[in-house]
């Protein structure tokens, strides 16, 4: 049956409405409780090292899949966040971090206050096991591990799980001049308004992700340098810049580095922020012997420049209302020569562009309960950047999503949502229902367990 059953939809809508409305205190976070319960807090108190975990699971259903497709997995595509229908073991994360004592949190934000005068060193480490780890792998790193080298069709059919280490980097703060932070290793790019994983502090209020989430790189390998440029009544301004191997790439296959960076501004009270983030560089595969598709679809003997930008921000109006928004733009060059090949469309690739906009408004009913609505538009006229989740469909994607987050306690949170998507085709493409439809209605209920 291709339609969502009335009882199922009613149950999800009820979940959005029946939470008690009595006053509640903010929950005490449960992150790190398991490790400290087993081994004590000596590691954190004595060395500043924090160990915590997150289990991310969901149940979902859409009205465009068949029963056979739901059995095979990834029948929610091109929707990302949870791609399988039914119950999905999304991801099990282990985090081991030693945060820096600095005036800048790498990849996140500059901080107010005086400049620290002492050098400091730290690190970040994350493992990700589950269905979503398939999208967190890096070429030349965990992509080639035995358990991750699976046939794509079989992995989809059997709903196989993967193991990734998307973060393994050293960090340092050096107090010279204005003070500098350094991060080096494998780490998430943090380009975009919504970024993985779904830790409590992440700006991911809904379980499914916007289309812009897919358009940027997930991980990078390289170094990132940051410093705070301003800290006064006009606000807090920081900048980051560094060379990386490319998009999700440790094994450089075109002998050309990319440049990643960000300009980050905050108001003195940290209630408003604005980030301009980018990654630019040549992203073609130099030869057929080392093709890193679908991340890099272009094969060429000549350099083919790729650029991606995200302008995103957030504003807290008061203790209840907040608004986040993002605009993205990207361009992959192509010289049009017969020797410049797109692995999907063939020889003579002459470039592709994409852009999108999304915004999320959140109303915090009380400290443990918040309601969010997100609207989005994403234009991929060449069917390039959303591939392979959208089967290369060319046109404009639109979506409206509503949901809530309820924290039962410091360990368990639930996030139900209702989402409607529709597609304006450039020609005859249909991205939903395995290539049959141009709109879809889906429901999802996500559980997050922090330990």
Image (cartoon, rainbow, N blue to C red):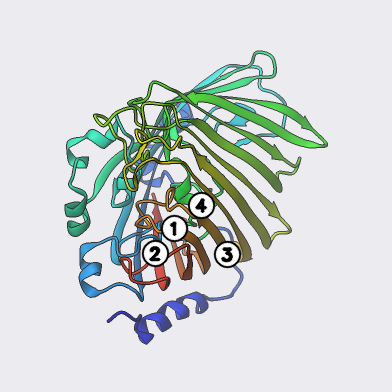
Q: Which residue is mark 3?
A: 375
Disc with the residue nearer the chain's start (3 vs 4): 4
Q: Quick check: marks 3 and 2 in contact, CB under 8 Å? A: no
Residue annotated with mark 1: 394
Kindly give the residue lying farthest to the right in the view shown: 233
- Residues at circles 2 and 1 in contact by the CB criterion of under 8 Å: yes
| Rendered position, 238 above or below 385 | above
Give the number of the mark in front: 3 or 1. 1
Check the picture and name the quadrant holding the N terminus. Answer: bottom left
The tag earlier along the polypeptide, 3 or 1, is 3
Q: Tell me the number on the disc at residue 429.
A: 2
Nearer-the-camera pick, 205 or 367: 205
- Classify 10 Å Cα crowding around label 3: few (below 14), some (14-19), many (20 and above): some
Q: Nearer the viewer, mark 4 or mark 1?
A: 1
Q: Neighbour class for label 1 at 10 Å: few (<14), some, many (≥20)? A: many
290 or 35: which is nearer to us? 290
Q: Secondary structure at mark 2?
A: loop
Query: Label for residue 212?
Result: 4
Whichever of labels 2 and 1 marks the residue nearer the N terminus, that label is 1
Distance CA(mark 3)–CA(mark 1): 20 Å
Q: Is residue 433 shown left or right of residue 27?
A: left
């Amino acid at each position: 049956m291709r339609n969502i059953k009335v009882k199922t939809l009613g149950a999800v809508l009820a979940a959005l409405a029946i939470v008690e409305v009595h006053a509640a205190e903010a929950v005490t976070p449960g992150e790190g409780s398991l490790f400290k319960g087993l081994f004590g807090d000596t590691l954190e108190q004595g060395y500043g090292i924090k160990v915590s975990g997150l289990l991310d699971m969901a149940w979902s259903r859409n009205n465009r899949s068949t029963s056979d497709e739901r059995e095979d997995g990834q029948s929610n595509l091109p929707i990302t966040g949870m791609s399988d229908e039914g119950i999905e073991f999304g991801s099990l994360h282990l985090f081991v971090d030693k945060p820096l004592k600095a005036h800048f949190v790498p990849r996140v934000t500059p901080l107010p206050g005086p400049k620290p005068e002492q050098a400091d060193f730290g690190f970040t480490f994350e493992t990700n096991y589950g269905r979503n780890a398939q999208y967190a792998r890096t070429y030349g790193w965990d992509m080639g591990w035995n358990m991750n080298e699976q046939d794509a069709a079989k992995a989809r059919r059997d709903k196989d799980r993967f193991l990734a280490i998307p973060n393994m980097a050293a960090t340092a703060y050096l107090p010279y001049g204005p003070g500098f932070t350094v991060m080096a290793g494998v780490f998430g790019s943090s380009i975009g308004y919504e970024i993985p994983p779904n830790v409590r502090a992440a700006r991911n209020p809904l379980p499914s992700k916007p289309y812009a989430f897919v358009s940027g790189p997930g991980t990078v390998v390289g170094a990132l340098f940051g410093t705070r440029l301003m800290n006064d009544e006009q606000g807090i301004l920081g900048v980051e810049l560094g060379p990386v191997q490319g998009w999700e790439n440790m094994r450089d296959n075109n002998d050309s580095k990319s440049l990643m960076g960000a300009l980050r501004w905050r108001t003195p009270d940290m209630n408003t922020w604005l980030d301009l983030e980018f990654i630019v560089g040549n992203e073609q595969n130099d030869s057929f012997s080392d093709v890193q598709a679908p991340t890099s679809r272009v094969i060429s003997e000549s350099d083919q420049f790729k650029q991606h930008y995200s302008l995103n921000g957030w504003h807290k109006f008061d203790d209840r209302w907040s608004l986040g928004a993002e605009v993205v733009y990207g361009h992959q060059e192509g010289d049009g020569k017969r020797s410049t090949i797109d692995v999907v469309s063939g020889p003579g690739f002459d470039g592709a562009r994409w852009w999108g906009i999304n915004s999320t408004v959140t109303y915090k009913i009380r400290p443990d309960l918040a309601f969010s609505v997100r609207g989005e538009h994403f234009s991929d006229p060449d069917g390039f950047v959303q591939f392979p989740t959208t089967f290369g469909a060319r046109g404009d994607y639109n979506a409206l999503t509503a949901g809530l987050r309820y924290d039962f306690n410091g360990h368990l949170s639930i996030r139900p949502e209702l989402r409607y998507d529709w597609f304006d085709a450039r020609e005859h493409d249909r991205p939903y229902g395995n290539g049959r439809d141009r709109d879809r209605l889906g429901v999802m209920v996500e559980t997050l367990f922090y330990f």
